[in-house]
Image (spheres, helix red, strand yellow):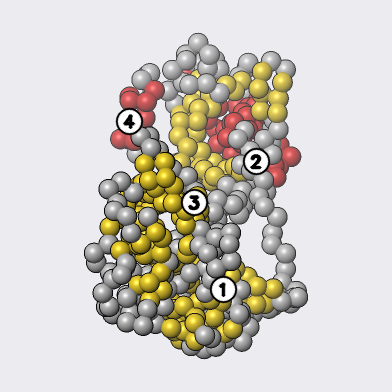
């Protein structure tokens, strides 16, 4: 235990009380004990002894005994405790003709030799105001306070009186009171509960790796096939099966999606709702399964680096069977003009850029274009601008477009809707006649 912020004042008050009890041994009539600055000549005891605390220093042995007081997160581990030593100057006043100063010095020296340690029962409360005192809890501290004489050299004594007190020298003695322990009133957290049953999970240092993200067609991962909301995807890599005591989870752009099938080199799953056309990421996490009953602990285990893939928009089915949601608007906007309205899956998000590409038919035979790339060169582009809100319905003005039949392709942030191709590899649909 330790005292509170009143402990230093309590030591001074207790010292005054102790010296007062034995001051009559000096045989000086009317002697008393004061506790003011020696330069307050009108308030020091005349005759008597004045107790002046002129310095407080950290105790060398205990100054860091309370460290650390807080954990890295700021949680209080134990109450902060200050350990200080108090340096007192005792000055003596009286009629020097009868050696009253020296007699008082003798009485004080003998008293502090008789009581080098302050008894707990003698510790006094601290005066706060007229008739009001408060306890310092100094009597509860673990160590008793000991008074030790300080031997000053002539130079040290000269500095103390000339620079600090700036009054004429009188007979004096110095004592060190050590150690005063003060503790803050902060409430420490209760100690951690004891461990009844240790439960440990030991896993190998093996990270999952995702090398490719491919669309699944006809039950197999297919290179170059467009990834849409209608297709499953396959994550190809290594170490994709969690070791014993763990589980494998997949996050698509931060959305947790349960896998349909898992092997060491491949994970197959459907895409979650809530994605937008454009660049997406796939990441494999393997949280640890432990506890009683066993539960997954997110944030534990191994995690792969994110693997990027392009989610292509699809042109949505139309109302009639076999049709697509592509509508030619004869008079749209101001001034009125032709426009093409296209509904896509999934919806594009605010801030994404929409572009329409129209390729005239018939087109010459050419190699098949990658499913998530723009159609062959020679088409016309119509800018739908940056979207002001989330939407699945896009409208593109067709100013200057000649009449004819065109293959329709929508690009959202560069992600292109898939095209169907003919026997020669030329794009054949979806199409619209203007």
Question: Circle 1 — which element?
Answer: loop
In the rendered structure, the answer to whether residue 391 lies left or right of residue 157 reads right
Q: Earlier in the sequence, mark 1 or mark 2?
A: 2
Q: Residue at x 65, y 22 (%)?
A: 128
- Give the quarter of the image for residue 377: bottom left
Q: Position of residue 180 (x, y in %)?
A: 57, 43
Disc 4 versus disc 1: nearer the observer:
1
Q: Earlier in the sequence, mark 4 or mark 1?
A: 4
Disc 2 versus disc 3: nearer the observer:
3
Question: Circle 3 — which element?
Answer: strand
Disc 4 versus disc 2: nearer the observer:
2
Disc 3 versus disc 1: nearer the observer:
3
Q: Residue at x 46, y 21 (%)?
A: 38
- Compared to 25, does 150 lie above or below? below
Question: Circle 2 — which element?
Answer: loop
Q: Mark 3 touching mark 1, by CB under 8 A?
A: no
In the rendered structure, the answer to whether residue 91 lies left or right of residue 400 reads right
For disc 3, the marked residue is 393
Q: Mark 4 touching mark 1, by CB under 8 A?
A: no
For disc 4, the marked residue is 159
């Amino acid at each position: 235990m330790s005292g509170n912020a009143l402990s230093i004042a309590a030591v001074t008050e207790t010292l005054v009380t102790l010296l007062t009890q034995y001051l009559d041994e000096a045989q000086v009539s009317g002697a008393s004990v004061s506790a003011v600055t020696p330069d307050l000549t009108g308030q020091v005891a005349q005759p008597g002894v004045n107790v002046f605390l002129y310095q407080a220093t950290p105790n060398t042995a205990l100054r860091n005994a309370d460290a650390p007081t807080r954990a890295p997160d700021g949680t209080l581990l134990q109450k902060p405790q200050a350990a200080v030593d108090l340096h007192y100057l005792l000055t003596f006043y009286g009629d020097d003709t009868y050696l009253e100063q020296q007699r008082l010095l003798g009485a004080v020296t003998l008293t502090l030799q008789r009581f080098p340690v302050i008894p707990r029962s003698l510790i006094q409360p601290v005066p706060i105001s007229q008739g009001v005192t408060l306890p310092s809890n100094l009597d509860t501290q673990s160590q008793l306070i000991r008074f030790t004489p300080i031997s000053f050299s002539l130079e040290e004594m000269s500095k103390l009186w000339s620079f600090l007190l700036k009054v004429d020298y009188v007979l004096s003695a110095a004592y060190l009171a050590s150690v005063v322990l003060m503790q803050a009133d902060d409430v420490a957290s209760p100690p951690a509960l004891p461990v009844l049953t240790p439960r440990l999970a030991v896993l190998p240092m093996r990270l999952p790796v995702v090398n490719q993200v491919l669309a699944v067609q006809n039950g197999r991962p297919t290179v170059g096939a467009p990834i849409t909301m209608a297709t499953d995807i396959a994550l190809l890599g290594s170490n994709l099966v969690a070791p014993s005591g763990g589980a494998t989870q997949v996050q698509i752009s931060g959305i947790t999606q349960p896998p349909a099938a898992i092997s060491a080199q491949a994970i197959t799953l459907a895409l979650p709702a809530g994605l937008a056309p454009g660049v997406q990421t796939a990441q494999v996490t393997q949280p640890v399964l432990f506890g009683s009953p066993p539960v997954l602990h997110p944030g534990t285990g191994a995690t792969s680096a994110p693997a990027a893939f392009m989610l292509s928009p699809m042109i949505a089915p139309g109302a009639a069977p076999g049709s697509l949601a592509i509508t030619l608007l004869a008079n749209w906007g101001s001034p009125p003009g032709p426009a093409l309205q296209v509904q896509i899956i999934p919806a594009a998000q605010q801030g994404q850029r929409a572009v329409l590409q129209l390729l005239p038919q018939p087109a010459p035979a050419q190699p098949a274009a990658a499913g998530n790339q723009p159609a062959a060169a020679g088409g016309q582009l119509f800018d739908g601008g940056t979207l002001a809100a989330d939407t699945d319905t896009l409208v593109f003005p067709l100013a200057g477009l000649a009449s004819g039949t065109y293959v329709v392709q929508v690009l959202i942030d560069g992600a292109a809707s898939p095209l169907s191709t003919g026997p020669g590899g030329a794009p054949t649909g979806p199409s619209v006649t203007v």
